[in-house]
Amino acid sequence: MEIALEKNSIASQQKLKGLEEFSAEQLFFINYAFSWCTNQRPEAAIFGAVYDVHSPPEARVNVVLANMPQFSNHFKCQPGTPMNPRKRCQVW
């Protein structure tokens, strides 16, 4: 994801109508989160939490982005907040 972010930053400095307040880097993260958007009934979410082997969409977005310093830098998240924790997990 870091490579895609870097390529996005270099390639796209164009602003989108209605989203001018966001940088290209912020739009990259917004698009990533949007790709995991769902509209589930509460019962379906509970069923998924119990029986699905995959993490719920919220975790797939928030946990990944909270562990990326680039996210908190581009959105200026305060240190020690949920999206800019003092300790991060790095897999690779």
Image (cartoon, rainbow, N blue to C red):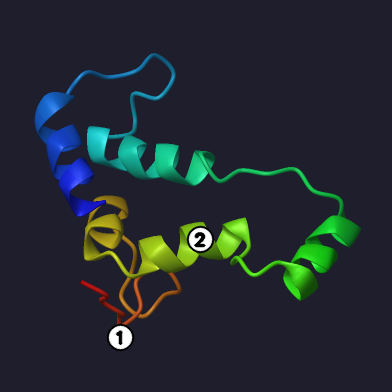
Q: Secondary structure at mark 1?
A: loop
Residue 34: mark? none
Mark 1 closeness class: few <14, some 14–19, many ≥20 residues within 10 Å:
few
- Mark 2 and mark 1 in contact? Answer it, CB < 8 Å: no
The circle drawn on residue 87 is: 1
Residue 62 horizontal/vertical position (percent): 48, 63
Q: Is residue 48 above or below residue 12?
A: below
Q: Residue furthest top?
A: 17
The image quarter containing residue 89 is bottom left
- State left or right for residue 5 relative to residue 11: right
Residue beneath the point at 30% across and 85% down: 87
Q: What is the x, y in percent for residue 69?
A: 23, 65
Give, as a three-letter code, the residue at label 1.
Lys
Residue type marked 2: Arg
User: Which numbered disc flags the more N-terminal residue, 2 or 1?
Assistant: 2
Could you tell me which residue is drawn at 26 percent across and 51 percent down? 1
Label 2 or label 1, whichever lies nearer to me, is 2
Q: CA distance from mark 2 to mark 1?
A: 18 Å
Q: Position of residue 44 (x, y in %)?
A: 85, 57
Identify the residue at image location x=40%, y=25%. 19
Residue 60 tag number: 2
Q: Is residue 14 above or below residue 89?
A: above
Horizontal arrangement in the rendering, residue 1 relative to residue 54 (left or right): left
Name, please, the residue furthest toward the right.
43
Quadrant occupied by the C terminus: bottom left
Outermost residue toward the bottom in this view: 87
**Looking at this view, is 59 or 48 the one in front?**
48
Say which of 49 and 88 sits in front.
Answer: 49
Q: How many marks?
A: 2
Neighbour tally class for label 2: few under 14, some 14-19, many 20 plus, Cα within 10 Å: some
Say which element carries label 2. helix
